[in-house]
Image (cartoon, helix red, strand yellow):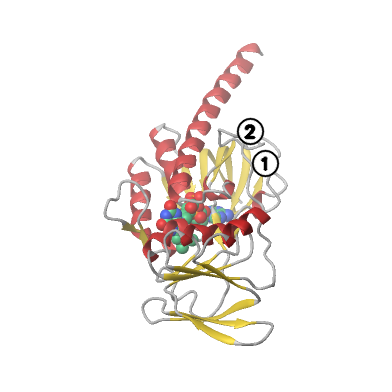
Amino acid sequence: MTSEKVSCLIIGSGPAGYTAAIYASRAGLNPVLYQGAQPGGQLTITTEVDNFPGYPDGVTGPEMMIQFENQARRFGTDIRYGMITEVDFTSYPHKVIVDGKKEIIAESVIVSTGASAKWLGIEGEERLNGHGVSACAVCDGFFFRGQDVVVVGAGDTAAEEASYLAKLARKVYLLVRRDEMRASKIMQKRLETLPNVEILWNTETVKLNGEHGLESVEVRNNKTGEETVLNATGFFVAIGHKPNTDIFKGYLNMDETGYIQTIPGSSCTNIKGVFACGDAQDNVYRQAVTAAGTGCMAALDAERFLMEHEVEVMLEESAS
Ligand SMILES: Cc1cc2nc3c(=O)[nH]c(=O)nc-3n(C[C@H](O)[C@H](O)[C@H](O)COP(=O)(O)OP(=O)(O)OC[C@H]3O[C@@H](n4cnc5c(N)ncnc54)[C@H](O)[C@@H]3O)c2cc1C
């Protein structure tokens, strides 16, 4: 197996990874960035991004991520195709394996592997993604002002998405598969106060219809078998996200759903020299701009760590 030593390794190429790369390369850390299976990250599967500052007329997700990449390249980031398949953080410097066949010895590691929204896997969902189908009300709710929308899910996220959309949409149907919600009592109480939210209990989605954009949602009551068509132009899947952090299990502290825990106010993890940013460590905000912000933090934390480490090594050498 070939081996290479790097000062700063960045894992992931979403807004967090590329922002970390911009800061790390400008600070002279010569970062190497592995893009993973989804170069550009989650935004490459969406159409319009309207809420990232600096784009007054909006921008498409793929276009914006090319600009992130170009900016990171401009300062010399070494951007590579490849997937990190294994890590070993038990000794320092850290060991990381790329595609099961190359070893990287890294003095600092920035984890920006993001998260993936969970989807239902029903007919029309993938085809209409970005054309009425979304997994983020804060991102896309604005496009459905005054329209009828559907939210699917029964947890706190679904309740939050429905409440958020109730301020913008004319009508919000919340589809709950069972006859009760998992959301906290307080969130459920809040939903009850919203006159334009209607909860459809024991209801599952069958199919999404529409040619170029969502036109209607076919649903079925799983108790009675009755099928109904809801005329809605927005369909928000709120059944959870999965952070892409499996390879770090056993090394990095995580919450019960796999989000990496960082020391508050920093990107530092429980392992020295390993930093986490973006959606991989954020189950609350999950926005491109917050991912970019924490990417900046991770690069600055890595830079400080490497400088302090260098001084420690110098002191050790002069003492011996
Ligand atoms: C459909 C959709 C629309 C959205 N719209 C908006 C919006 O309008 N505005 C907004 O602010 N936010 C939006 N979001 C949320 C936004 O996309 C995320 O908050 C943001 O992309 C998170 O950035 P990130 O860098 O943390 O991770 P991600 O964008 O998830 O990127 C993760 C990166 O890590 C890589 N990776 C994962 N595992 C490995 C591995 N083992 N080795 C190497 N690389 C790996 C992946 O290939 C990917 O490049 C949207 C999300 C979705 C799904």
What residue sits 27% from the left and 51% below the top?
56
Q: For the residue carrying disc 2, how many other residues have a C-alpha within 10 Å: few (<14), some (14-19), or many (20+)?
A: some
Element under disc 2 = loop
Q: Residue 48, image x and y in percent?
A: 35, 61
For this orientation, the residue located farthest to the top is 319
Q: Which mark is residue 1?
A: none
Q: Is any atom of residue 36 visible in this view?
A: no
What residue sits 67% from the left and 41% below the top?
89
For this orientation, the residue located farthest to the right is 250
Q: Residue 237, image x and y in percent?
A: 54, 67
- Report the residue marked by disc 2: 272
User: Quadrant of the rendered structure where residue 146 is?
Assistant: bottom left
- Report the residue marked by disc 1: 89
Q: Is residue 20 left or right of residue 176?
A: left
Q: Is residue 136 above or below residue 256?
A: below
Q: For the residue carrying disc 1, how many other residues have a C-alpha within 10 Å: few (<14), some (14-19), or many (20+)?
A: some
Amino acid type at mark 2: Lys
Element under disc 1 = loop
Q: How many marks?
A: 2
